[in-house]
C-alpha cells in the first residue's frame, strides 16, 4: 500500500462523506443501509481470504451468529449498546475456537472449506429446530424457523427510548463501514497485516522464518468473524427480525461470489462486489421473469472466465496502463532491446 | 573446543518399511562449515528435514545448543536463531525483494530496525537494483540469493542450506560462495549439496550419507579420494 495511514484516513473520510451525501440522491436510504451491511460482510471475507489466504465457506455462520447474539441480548437487556458489543465478541470468540481447532490441527485448504461449510449447516439446522418453548435463553425464545422478531433495535447508548432508525440508521451504518474499512486498512499496514500477506503467499517460508502461522491465522480468522458479527447485528437492526436463513449456505456462497466479482486482495473490491450484486439482486427481485440465483451464477461464470481478478484490480490495471508511470528499469530495458534490434538490422 | 551447536543422537526416520535415516549420530560445533553429500536417496534431505522440524524423526533426539528440539515445529526452531533454506527457492513470489527480506527481519527486530537491517542485507547481497521487483519475476539465481538474504537477516548462529547452488550459473555460484563464507564468520553452517565442484570450493569437513547412514566423515580431499565413497558415487570399484 502506498502513502501513509493518515493519508488513507483522510481519503476514507472524504469518500465516506461524499457517498453519504450522493448515494441517497440515487437510492433510498432503506435499501442503501442493507447494501452497506452486505459491504461490511463482504469486507470481512475479503480480509481473511484476500489477505490471509483463508477460504472460509462459512462466513454466513458468523453473520448469523452476530445477528442472533444481538437479538437475544437485546431482548434480555432491553438496550442495544451491550448487545452490539456482544454481537462482535461472540462470533469472534467462536471463530477463534474453531480456527484454533482447524489451524492447530494443521487443516488447510479443502478441509478448512469443508469444516466451515459444515459448521454453517449445523447452525442452520440447529436454529431451525428450536421452535419449541424449551429453547429459551433468558427471556428470549429462539423461535426455530420463525426466527426472533420484536427485539430492541439500535438506540442512543444509555437511552433505550431514543431509537436510531430511518435515515439516522443509514448514517450510523455508513460511518461504521467507513470506520471498519479504516481499521482493516490500519491492520493491513501494520506488521500483523504484512505478515498475514506473507502467510497467504508462502506458509512454509513464513514458518521457516520463525512465525507461528497457526496463531496468526487464528487471530485473522477471528477478526474477520468479528466484522461479520457486526454486520449481522446491523442487519438484525435493519430487518427487525432474525431468521435461520441468515446461516444458509446460499448466503455463504453469495459472500464468496461478491469477493470474486469485486476483486480479491483488495479492500474495496469485496465491498463494491457485495453492494453491487446485492443491489442487482434487489432490482431483479422486483420482477419474477428471471431467477436471481441464475443471474448471480452467470455473473460468477463470466467473471471467472473473462475477468478473474475482479472489477477493482482490473480497473486498477487499466488505470496503471493509461496513466501510471512506467518503471525506469523497464524503459531502459526496452531501449536496450530496441538498440539490439537496430544493430542486428 | 567450540560450543556444540547441533547434535543428533540415533536419529532414525522410517516411512513405512523404508528407513530413510538410520541411527544417525551427528555433531556440529560453532562456526563450523559442514557439507552433507551422498547419492540420491542417501538420506541427506530426510536428515535435513528432521533437524529443521519439517519432519519429526521416528526415533532419536536432536539437540540445538543443548536444548532438545526433536519434536519442535519449524517456527520454534527458527526462533532460536536458526536460518533455514530449503531445496527449491521458497519465497513469497508476489511480494518484492524488500518485502520478503523485511518480513524475515521483522521476526527478530522492531519495524524501524527491520527496515535498517533489510537495507543492509540488500546492499550486502547486491540486490539494490531489483529491491522493488516482485520475486516471481526474477531469475533462479537471484531468487536463491534473496532466499539467502532471508536467512542472513536474522543474524543466525546456525544456518541450514539445502542445495544452495542448484541450477545456478558459475557467476551466481561464486557470489553465493562469498556470501556463505561471510555467514560462516558468525554462524555454523550445514550444506546439503550434490555439486562436487562447489563442495570442494567451500568445505573442509564433509559427511557422506549412504543408505540412510553416515558412511564417512573427514576432510573433503580424503573423502573424495576414498575408494568407498567413489564406489558409492560412481557405482563401481575405484
Image (cartoon, coloured by chain):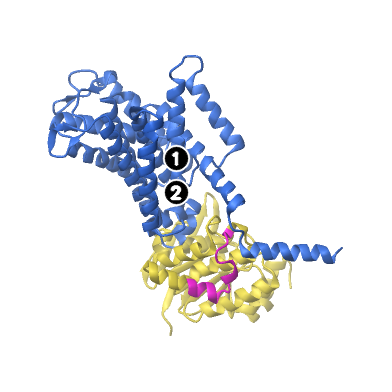
Q: Which label lies toward us, 2 or 1?
A: 1
User: Which residue is most to the top?
Assistant: A288
A203 part of magenta stretch: no
- Determine crowd level at label 2: few under 14, some 14-19, many 20+ residues with C-alpha closer than 10 A: many
Q: Chain of mark 2?
A: A
Q: CA distance from mark 2 to mark 1?
A: 12 Å
Element type where label 2 sits in the image:
helix
Q: On the image, numbered disc 2 is attached to which residue?
A: A51
Q: Is residue B195 left or right of residue A263?
A: right
Q: Residue at x 13, y 33 (%)?
A: A160
Viewer-side residue, B37 vs B198: B198
User: Which residue is most to the bottom?
Assistant: B1
Element type where label 1 sits in the image:
helix
Q: On the image, numbered disc 1 is attached to which residue?
A: A270
B130 part of magenta stretch: yes
Residue A195's image quarter?
bottom left
Q: Colour of chain A?
A: blue
Q: Residue at x 41, y 31 (%)?
A: A26
Give the extent of the magenta segment: B119-135
Q: State whether residue A304 appears in this view.
A: yes
Q: Which chain is yellow?
A: B
Amino acid at each position: 500500500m502506498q502513502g501513509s495511514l493518515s493519508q488513507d484516513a483522510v481519503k476514507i473520510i472524504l469518500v465516506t462523506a461524499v457517498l453519504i451525501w450522493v448515494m441517497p440522491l440515487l437510492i433510498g436510504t432503506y435499501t442503501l443501509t442493507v447494501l452497506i451491511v452486505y459491504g461490511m460482510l463482504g469486507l470481512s471475507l475479503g480480509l481473511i481470504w484476500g489477505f490471509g489466504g483463508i477460504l472460509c465457506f462459512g462466513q454466513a455462520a458468523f453473520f448469523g451468529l452476530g445477528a442472533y447474539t444481538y437479538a437475544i441480548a437485546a431482548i434480555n437487556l432491553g438496550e442495544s449498546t451491550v448487545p452490539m458489543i456482544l454481537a462482535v465478541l461472540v462470533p469472534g470468540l467462536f471463530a477463534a475456537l474453531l480456527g484454533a481447532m482447524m489451524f492447530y490441527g494443521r487443516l488447510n485448504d479443502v478441509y478448512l472449506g469443508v469444516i466451515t461449510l459444515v459448521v454453517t449447516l449445523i447452525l442452520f439446522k440447529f436454529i431451525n429446530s428450536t421452535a419449541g418453548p424449551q429453547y429459551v435463553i433468558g427471556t428470549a425464545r429462539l423461535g426455530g424457523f420463525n426466527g426472533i422478531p420484536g427485539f430492541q433495535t439500535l438506540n442512543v447508548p444509555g437511552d433505550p427510548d431514543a431509537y436510531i432508525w430511518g435515515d439516522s440508521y443509514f448514517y450510523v451504518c455508513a460511518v461504521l463501514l467507513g470506520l471498519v474499512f479504516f481499521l482493516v486498512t490500519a491492520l493491513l499496514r501494520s506488521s500483523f497485516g504484512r505478515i498475514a500477506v506473507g502467510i497467504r503467499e508462502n506458509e512454509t517460508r513464513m514458518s521457516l522464518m520463525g512465525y507461528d502461522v497457526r496463531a496468526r491465522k487464528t487471530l485473522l480468522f477471528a477478526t474477520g468473524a468479528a466484522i461479520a458479527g457486526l454486520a449481522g447485528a446491523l442487519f438484525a437492526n435493519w430487518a427487525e427480525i432474525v431468521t435461520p436463513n441468515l446461516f444458509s449456505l446460499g448466503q455463504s456462497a453469495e459472500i464468496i461470489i461478491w469477493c470474486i466479482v469485486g476483486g480479491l486482495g483488495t479492500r474495496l473490491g469485496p465491498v463494491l462486489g457485495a453492494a453491487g450484486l446485492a443491489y442487482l439482486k434487489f432490482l431483479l427481485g422486483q420482477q419474477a421473469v428471471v431467477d436471481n440465483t441464475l443471474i448471480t451464477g452467470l455473473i460468477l461464470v463470466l467473471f471467472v472466465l473473462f475477468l478473474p481478478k475482479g472489477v477493482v484490480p482490473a480497473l486498477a490495471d487499466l488505470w496503471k496502463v493509461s496513466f501510471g508511470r512506467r518503471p525506469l528499469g523497464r524503459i531502459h530495458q526496452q531501449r536496450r532491446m530496441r538498440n539490439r534490434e537496430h544493430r542486428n538490422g | 573446543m567450540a560450543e556444540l551447536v547441533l547434535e543428533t543422537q540415533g536419529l532414525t526416520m522410517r516411512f513405512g518399511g523404508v528407513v530413510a535415516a538410520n541411527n544417525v549420530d551427528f555433531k556440529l560445533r560453532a562456526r563450523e562449515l559442514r557439507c552433507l553429500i551422498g547419492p540420491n536417496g542417501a538420506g541427506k534431505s530426510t536428515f535435513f528435514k528432521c533437524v529443521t522440524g519439517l519432519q519429526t524423526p521416528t526415533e532419536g533426539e536432536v539437540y540445538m545448543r543443548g536444548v532438545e528440539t526433536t519434536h519442535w515445529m519449524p517456527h520454534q526452531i527458527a526462533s532460536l536463531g536458526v536460518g533455514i533454506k530449503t531445496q527449491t527457492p521458497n519465497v513469497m513470489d508476489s511480494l518484492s525483494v524488500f518485502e520478503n527480506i523485511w518480513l524475515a527481519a521483522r521476526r527478530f527486530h522492531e519495524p524501524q530496525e527491520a527496515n535498517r537491517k533489510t537495507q543492509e542485507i540488500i546492499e550486502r547481497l547486491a540486490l539494490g537494483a531489483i529491491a522493488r521487483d516482485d520475486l516471481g519475476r526474477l531469475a533462479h539465481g537471484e531468487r536463491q540469493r534473496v532466499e539467502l538474504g532471508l536467512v542472513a537477516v536474522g543474524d543466525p548462529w546456525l544456518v541450514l542450506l539445502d542445495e544452495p547452488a542448484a541450477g545456478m550459473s558459475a557467476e551466481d555460484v561464486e557470489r553465493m560462495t562469498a556470501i556463505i563464507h561471510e555467514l560462516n564468520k558468525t554462524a555454523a553452517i550445514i550444506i546439503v549439496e550434490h555439486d562436487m565442484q562447489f563442495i570442494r570450493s567451500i568445505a573442509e569437513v564433509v559427511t557422506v550419507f549412504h543408505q540412510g547412514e553416515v558412511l564417512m566423515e573427514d576432510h573433503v580431499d580424503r573423502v573424495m579420494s576414498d575408494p568407498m565413497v567413489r564406489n558409492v558415487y560412481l557405482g563401481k570399484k575405484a
